[in-house]
Amino acid sequence: MNITITQLYTLLSEKVGKETAESLTTYIEAKIEHSVVDKTQHLASKADLANAKTDMIKWFVGLFLTLALMIIGLYLKL
């Protein structure tokens, strides 16, 4: 069920009064805003993703070369 701040204010003002409803909706709105800001700060940027990609490529190439040398060494030993 989706509800807007205005609808919440209207529903609460009928039950608990206008001042209390305004305080509650302001508090809820501030909490939601704070939560959204916290979550967006943890998102990775394009630069972070590019750095992670290059690091992964370096590791893959290094592991591939090591594995290839190990296999060649086993063939030469036999």
Image (cartoon, grey):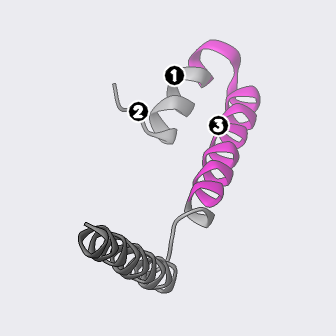
Q: Which residue sits at x=45%, y=33%?
A: 7
The image quarter in which residue 17 lies:
top right
Q: Which residue sits at x=51%, y=22%?
A: 11
- The residue wearing badge 2 is 3
Amino acid at pointer 2: Ile
Estimate the x, y position of residue 55 in percent, counting from the top left.
48, 80
Quarter of the image with the N terminus in it: top left
Q: Select label 1 or label 2 by which is in front.
A: 2
Amino acid at pointer 3: Thr
- The residue wearing badge 3 is 25
Does the CB distance between marks 1 and 2 fall below 8 Å?
yes
Q: Most extreme residue toward the top, as rendered?
A: 15
Alpha carbon distance from label 3 to label 1: 11 Å
Q: Is residue 20 above or below residue 72?
A: above
Does the CB distance between marks 3 and 1 fall below 8 Å?
no
Q: Is residue 34 above or below residue 59?
A: above
Kind of element beneath mark 1: helix
The image quarter in which residue 40 lies:
bottom right
Q: Is residue 75 left or right of residue 21?
A: left
Does the CB distance between marks 3 and 2 fall below 8 Å?
no
Q: Is residue 28 above or below residue 15?
A: below
- The residue wearing badge 1 is 11
Estimate the x, y position of residue 48 in percent, counting from the top left.
52, 79
